Image (spheres, coloured by chain):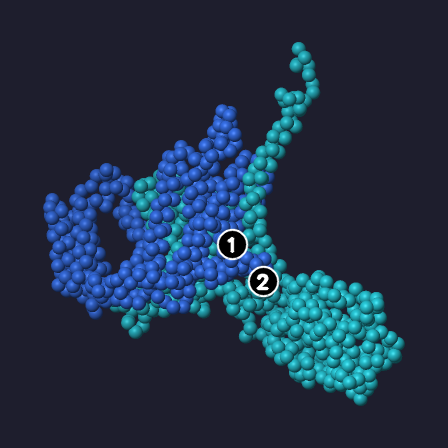
Chain colours: A blue, B cyan
Amino acid sequence: MALTPVQNQTPAFTASVSACAGALFGLFVGTAQGSGLLGLLIGAVLLGAMGFVFTGLIAQAKPVRWATVVVFALVGLVVGGLPALVLGALFGLFAGWFIFWLATSSYRKHLVPYLTPGQVLWHYGFRVICGAIFVFLITPILVVMPLSFNAEDFFTFTPEMLRFDPAGYSLKHYRDFLTNEGWQQALWNSLRIAPMATILSVGFGTLAAIGLSQPHVPFRRAIMAVLISPMIVPLIISAAGMYFFYSRIGLQGTYLGVVLAHAALGIPFVIITVTATLVGFDHSLTRAAANMGAGPITTFFRVQMPLILPGVISGGLFAFITSFDEVVVVLFVGSAGQKTLPWQMFIGLREQISPTILAVATILVGISICLLTTVELLRRRSERLRGMSPS
Amino acid sequence: MSDTTQSGPVLSADGTPLKRSLARALRMQKVRALMLIAPLLIFILLTFILPIADMLFRSVENRIVSDTLSETVVTLRDWDSVNGEAPEEAVYESLYYDLFVAAEAKEHTKLGTRLNYEQTGISSLFRSSGRKLDDIGEDHVKAMEKAGGGALKDEALWFEIITGGASGAGNTALLEAQRTKMAQLTGEDFSADIGFVPGAEFSDLFPRTAMAYTDFALFTAVLDEDVVAEEDPWETVFVAFAQEVQVPGGAEKLAAYTGPGAAELTAAAEALADLEPVSFKASFLDLDEDWGDVGNWRTIQTYSPTYTSGYFLNSIDMQKGVDGAEARPENQQIYITLFKRTMFMSLVITGSCIVLGYPVAWILANLPTRSANLLMILVLLPFWTSLLVRTSAWKVMLQQQGVINDVLVWLGLVADDARLVMINNQFGTIVAMTHILLPFMILPMYSVMQTINPTYLRAAKSLGATNWTAFWRVYFPQSVPGIGAGSILVFILSIGYYITPEIVGGTKGVFISNRIAYHISSSLNWGLAAALGTILLAVVLLLYWAYDKIVGIDNVKLG
C-alpha cells in the first residue's frame, strides 16, 4: 500500500546516491587492501555507473539483480576464494536492491506525502542508527556460536574457520563438556538446585501474590517493597549477608542453604509476573463460583488457577533462570559440593580460558531461546484468557 | 409504619448493626489476605532480611577484643594514651593471664589478625608472644615444683588445695564468672557440670590463683574432656601463687591458711624467697620489645569497646586516632577513590544506556505491532541470555586477539602491532555492562512510550512546530518517566555489579563490590566488608525508595 504516489528517479540522482554508498564501501575495502583513496574512487565509479545503467532497466529488475549477485560473487571467488565469494554475493545482493530501491522511489512510497527530503533522509538515517544498536545488542551472542565449533583451543576465529575449511571446525568442545567430570558435575548440581528453588519461590510467591491482589491489604506498599527487595539489593550484599548469617546457623556450604538463597532471589520475579496476571482478574468469577456452591479450595483450583496459570509458569521460568544463572550468591553460600554451571564458567573465565565455556554458552543461549519463546507464548495466552487483545 | 419512624442504627439480617457487620467482614478480608502473604513474608525475613541485618550488625560489632582480653580491657581503660608512656604493671599482669588462656584456646591469633587491620605488626606480635608465654615466671615455676620434694608436681594435690577438700565451702560465684568469660572467649557452651568448684577459703586468700585454676579446670573438663584432678595445672596457676605470696602481706595470708596442702604451699613459698617477684612488664618487654610500643597499646585501647565505628571510618579512608577520627596516610587511601569510580562508571553506563536505549524504545513503540514484536526479540534475547554467556562473549570480542581487533586490523584501521587495549580497563567494563543492562533501560522506556499518543506530535507539527521542537517540547517530556524509571533501575543494578567487572575490568575497571568480595573471601576482614556493603546498601535503598516514589514497585514489568 503506497501512501505517496511516486515516479521513477532520474539516472543522475540514482547514480550520485549509489556512488556515495559505493565510495563508503570502497573506502573500507581499499584500506584493507592498502590504499583507501583508490578503493574510494573505484567504489564510487563502479556503483555510480551501475546506478546510471540500472535506472533504465527497471522493467527487468529481477534478472538484473540476480546478475549483479552472480557477478559480484564470481569476482569475489577469483579475488579471495570462498570467504570473498560470500562477501561478494552479499554485497551484490545489497547493491542490486539498493539501486532499484532508489531508482523506483520505493523508499518514498510508505512515508506520508508532506515530508521534506531532509525528513526522509532523517527517517532512514534514524533506522540505520537503530539497526546499529540492534547489532550491538545481538552480535556478542551470535559471535559466541561459531566460535564454539573451533577446532583449536583459541578464543578467536582461526584462518581455517574464515576459509570455511571443514578442518577448522569441530565438536570437540561439546565433547569435552559432555565427558568432563567437572562440567558434568556442575550441570548436575545446577539441575538439582534450580528446580527446588523454583518450586519454593513459586509456591510461596503465588500464594502471596494472590494475597497481595486482594482489595484490602494493610501495609500493601511496605510488604511489596520487602518482597521485591531481593531483586534490588546488589547481589554481592545479599551474598555477603547470607554468607555471614548462614555460616552462623550452619547452612553455609550445604545444598539446603543454596536452595533457600536462590528461592529468596527468585521470589520477586514470581511476585511481579503473578501480580501482573492478577491485575485484570475479574473477582466476580470467584464470587460466582462461591454462589454456585464451590468451596474456596475448589474455586481456587477450578476457577482462579487456570486463569493465572500462564503468569505462574512464566514467573516460575524467571525464577528458574535466576537460579540457573546465579553465580555470586552460590560462590559464597555454596561450597565445592554445590559448584553450579555458572560457577564453573566463572572459574573458567577467570583462570583457565578454555573454549568449552563457549560451547556451554551456546547451549545456554539455546535454552534461553526456548524459555523466551515459552514465556512470550504464555504472555499472549494469558492476555487472550483475560480478554485483552494480544499485542 | 414502624420502619419510617425507626431512628436507631441500620441493622443487618442477623440483627447486628450494619456498620459493625461490615467492619467485621472487612477485617476478615484483611486477615485472610495477610494469612496468604505471611508464609512468604516469614520466608523472606528468615532467608534474606535477617542475613542483611546480620551484615549490618557485623559492620559495627567488635566483641573480639573485649572477649579475648576481658581483663586487660578493664585495666587498660584508665591508661592515659596521650602522654606517650607504656601502661603500668597491672595492665601487663592482666595481659599475661588473658593471653595465656587465649593462647591455650588458640584465639589470640584471631585477635592479632583483627588488630592487624588497624595497626600493622600486631598480628606477628601476638603470634610470637603466644608461643613464648611459658617463659614468663619460668624460674618461679621451677622453684615451686622442686620445693618440698616435688610435692606440688602432684596434680591431685592442687585439685584438693583449690577445692578446699571435700568439706570446704565452695565459691560458685567465681566459677560462674569464669564460665561466662570462657564462653565469650571461645564461643563454646561451658554450662556443663565439671565436678569442680573452687573452695571459698582459698579463693578469698589467693583470688588470682583460684581464678587461674578455675580457667584451667573449665578448659580441661569442657574442651579437652579430661578429668581435672588428673591433669597438670597450667603455669599460670604457679605464677599466680608466686605473685600473690610475694606481694606484701602475702606471707601472712599463707600463714593464716589452714586448708589442705598448707605445708606444701609454705615450702613452696620458702623456695621462692630467693627470687625477685615476677615483673610482668619486664618479662613482656623481654619477649618482644614491641610490647612497649605506645601505638600498639593505643590500638588495643581504641578497639576495646564492644561496638566500633572503626570499620566505617576505614571504609571512608579514615581511622581512629588519639583524638577522634583522622584521615589515613595518603598511600592507604583507596576506598573513596573506589566509591567515586563506582559512581562515575555507573553514571557513564546509565548515560550510555539512555543514549542507546532511547532510539530503540522509540522505534519499538512506533513501528507496526508485528515488526515491533520481531525486533523486541532482539532486545529480549540478550535479557534472557545468561549473564556469564554475555560476559564471556565480551571477553571474546574485546580481547587483543579478539573479534573487534581482528576486524579493525583487517580493515586496516589499526596496525597489527598496535591492537587496541579494550579489556581489563574501564572501557571494557563500561561497554560490557552497557550491553548487559541495556534491556533494563529499553523495557521501561518502551512501556512508557507505548502510551504516548502519536497524534500529539502531529498536532504540534500542524501548529507549525519544527520536527525538533515537536519532539523536544511535546514528545520528550512525556517520555521522561520512562527515562527516569530505566535510569534508576540501571543505576541500581550497575552500582552493585560484581561478575562483569571481575572478568573484564582488570584492576582499573573494578567496582566497590569487587573489593567487598575480596574482603570476604581473601583478606577475611569481614567487618570492613560489612561496612563497605552497608554504605553501598544505603545508597541502593535510597535509590530504591526514589524508584518507589517515582515509578511504584508494582509497576515493574518484565518482558
Residue in the picture at 47% in, 37% down: A278
Residues tagged 1 and 2 counted as in contact (Cβ below 8 A): no
Q: Is residue B553 left or right of residue A108?
A: right
Label 2 sits on a secondary structure element that is: helix
Q: Splitting the image into 4 quarters, where does residue A165 fall? A: bottom left
Residue B188: assigned label: none
Report the label total.
Answer: 2
- Kindly identify the amino acid type of the residue bearing the numbered disc 1: Leu
Position above or below: B186 against A223: below
Residue A256: assigned label: 1
Which image quarter holds the N terminus of chain B?
Answer: top right
Q: Splitting the image into 4 quarters, where does residue B151 fall? A: bottom right
Instruction: Specify the subunit that label 2 lies on.
Output: B
Q: Is residue B538 left or right of residue B152?
A: left
Q: Position of residue B510 (x, y in %)?
A: 46, 65
Instruction: Specify the subunit that label 1 lies on.
Output: A
Q: Splitting the image into 4 quarters, where does residue A179 fall? A: bottom left
Q: Position of residue B97 (x, y in %)?
A: 72, 75
Q: Position of residue B21 (x, y in %)?
A: 64, 27
Position above or below: A380 against B170: above
